[in-house]
Image: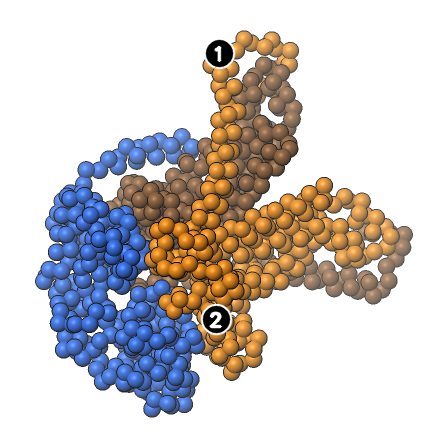
Amino acid sequence: MRTLPLKPRRSARVADLAMKGLLWTVALGFIAALLVVMGAILKQGWPVLNWGFFTKMPETLDAGGGIRPELFNSLYLVALSLALSLPIGLGAGIYMAEYARPGRWMDFLRLCIETLAATPSIVLALFGLMIFVQALDWSFSIRSGAMALALLNIPVITRVTELSLRGVPHELKEASYGLGATKLQTILRALLPSAAPGLLTGTVLAAGRAFGESAVLVFTAGTNTSMAFPDFSLKAPGETLAVHLWYVVSDGTLPDAREIAAGTAAVMILVLLVMNVVVRLVDRRLKRHAR
Amino acid sequence: MAMDAPLAAPARPKRPWTLLADRSAGSIFLLCTLVLVALILGLLGFLAWRGLGAFIAVPGNTGRVLSLREVFLGLDWSPNQDHFGVMPFILGSLTVVGLSIALAGPLGILTAVFVTQMAPKWMRALLRQTMDLLVGIPSVVYGIFGLATLLPFLSKGWLSDLPAAGFLASALILTVMIIPTVVSLSMDAFEALPRSLNEGARALGSTSWQSTARVLIPAAWPRLVTAIVLGMGRAIGEAMAVQMVIGNNPQWIGLMRDLTDKTPILRFLFTPASTLTTELVQELPNTPAHSPWNNVLFALGLLLYLLTMGSILFTRRMAGKRA
Amino acid sequence: MNLKTFALVAATLGATAAQAQTVTVMGSTALGPLMKRAAEMYMKSHAGVQIAISGGGSMTGLNQIAAGNCTIGISDVYATPDQEKAGIQNNDIVIEPFTLVVNPSVSVRNLSAQQAEAVFTGAVSNWNQVGGPDMKVIRINRPESSGTRAVQQKTVLGGKPFSSDQLIMDSTGAVLTAATTTKGAVCFIELDFAEKNKGKVEAVSYNGAFCTPENVKAGKYPLFSYGHAYINPAKTDAPTLAVAQDFLKFITSQTFQDDVVPKAGYMQVSLAAKLKTKL
């Protein structure tokens, strides 16, 4: 430290030291919380994870069921919901970053996006249940689930798109215009590629959230799986891993409900860790590429 | 990339469809944005339609029309006895959110101080990684952690093996879930302060803690409040993790009154209770459509939605004051 | 990745033009496993029939069948009068028996009808009032919306409200866990569960009769409800309705009732054909 013109009093220095100690403790406690949660889940789930657990159909009355259709449904629903929400989210994000002019209209739009992003998923579940499951008569199915999940994803993708586009250096845009490109050409050929790392991270973030979502899906995709595998039908019931975990625990009729839940939780944690690593690697590569 | 080309390149004549695409693009992007606006209004309209149905005679409704007073001030929720008081859920939500923010608020702000003011670089990276992972863990996984690890732990430690489901367990789980939100928004708050503020305080002889407590935190206060409000918003909307550990008893107020064989505070912390969200998860699919019971549940959904809107409006107002 | 996703969606949209006769079953999660087993067996012998089972809870099943949104609505409770107005038809498919159980710390093994009522309304709050040890009664119950709870209230409490001094658990499994770990606990539980967990909880006879098929058949044991399957002839197209009726005939057939129903923890619906009171 450089010398200070005025020296703090001794008691103040002691307080400072104590505070530093406290802050380190809080920060380390924060990390410890993560380790405890992940450690407990992996420790309880690990013994359950074997080949059969991944390849068997779930049981409804007896012990020893697997999670094959749930794993499939989770990935299928994430893919479908992204396919539905990416075009709209990207479009809205581009509008917010490149077309909307600051003012009341933009404030209002931003308010809408923020509110939708903050809406509790159980509220979206109410909406999904009434509209997709009942009014449209889609029952508890993949399509009801995909639509409801898309509602959850759209604001996330919109915000990420807007932020990534705003992060693109201004010179790039000017250069593109200078070359005679239209606004659309500039957006598609210069801005979006340059914003790709941010967009990708955001999309993976949305995918991760959709993968772990349960409240919305319990009321739209349902708590059953199709008896066929793999069933790409949009009308099939679409229980996902997260819903399965919740359902076996809260229903409690399976003799090995706790083991199944622990195993499912461990699988979800592992998938999230892999996603985390992949996004980091891809992000690094893309950034190097852009340079 | 095209950037290296000379800027003076002559503007090529554009093909008609390029121009057409360019002209229509704006409206297409606007349309995407309008989908969001429609969703927000649709949600509001739909929840209002179904939720207010409890208090207004709507064609298709069965059963009687309830008064706002008996629902929102009623302490007794027993629909089969025709009692529809939702106070237990409102108080339950407030308690859980209050307890968790009382923990997550100070801890989160302190962590943000640590990260922005004194943490070495490696620690900063480590904490950022930790936060990303904590945010990424799905709520049902927190729920099963609570159920399989936290509840037995509490039950053994405090209750001689009686069930520990209740407010304390829910609040602890929620604390871990919302702390990343509070930390990351508080970090933004501190980073937005001009550097000179801290340096000035230090030059006047403050220790780093003095400058934090007397200068930085007051200066960042409006944004810190925003961080706390958004953290509370997350806590109030969380459904599954809480549902798995709270015990789900809508009659918890009566239960607390009846059981006085333990110290009141312990009794309170370990009373199995219900919140707005857990009640929806619990009973929504098991109520006759358009009955008062069913309609009141939608009113709870409306209430949650209005609270969300309120918190967003509040944070925007705070942001407006700053500017 | 984006393009691939779109291709996938397009491919599946094209592939779902199914010609099969589809019967959708919604409702009770408790009856779900039994229906699933029935559907598997039925589909094996009837090519071209698809039976999709999704849960949602009893009331969801009734709401949906009344609105004509599914082919069969399964439920642990009878439809409300409003739902019946929609013209839905009930079929009883199984008997769901439940029994009183206590934590092993409670030595009581029989409760008369009056005692059982007093225990659950709160008139009795210590086990020594009904001949047990000096120990607080801990009542464990399902939420208000539970179908079995409604039946218990009608048969055991004569319609009186349950004491508010009770633990509410959201599922049968959770009720059982609480009963095994809480001293002084008492609850109702599906027979099947009680038998699978002998030793962890102790069965208590009601009015001197234990929950057995014989006692149910003899009319000595009243604590049971029916599993219902509702159809809505007015709002279902004729071919689907025919398949649904045939499927229900299969479920109520002697072979299915004798071979599968007891394994799933239920009793044959024919056992209580003599029963006069409608719960």
Report whether A34 appears left or right of B216: left
Quadrant placement of the C terminus of chain A: top right
Disc marking residue B16:
1
The residue at which mark 2 appears reads as: B252
Q: Is residue C254 visible?
A: yes
**Residue at the spot 85% in from the left edge and 64% down from the top edge:** A10
How would you rate the neighbour count of disc 2 (Cα within 10 Å): few for under 14, some for 14-19, many for 20 or more?
many
Q: Position of residue B36 (x, y in %)?
A: 49, 37
Chain letter of the orange region: B
Q: Which chain is brown?
A: A
Residue B213 at x, y = what percent? 76, 57
Label 1: which secondary element:
helix
Q: Secondary structure at mark 2?
A: helix
- For chain C, the rendered hue is blue
> Mark 1 — on which chain does it sit?
B
Camera-side residue of B66 and A101? B66
Type of residue at label 1? Pro
Residue B267 at x, y percent in the picture: 53, 76
In the figure, residue C22 lies in which quadrant?
A: top left
> Of callouts 2 and 1, which one flags the residue occurring earlier in the amino acid sequence?
1
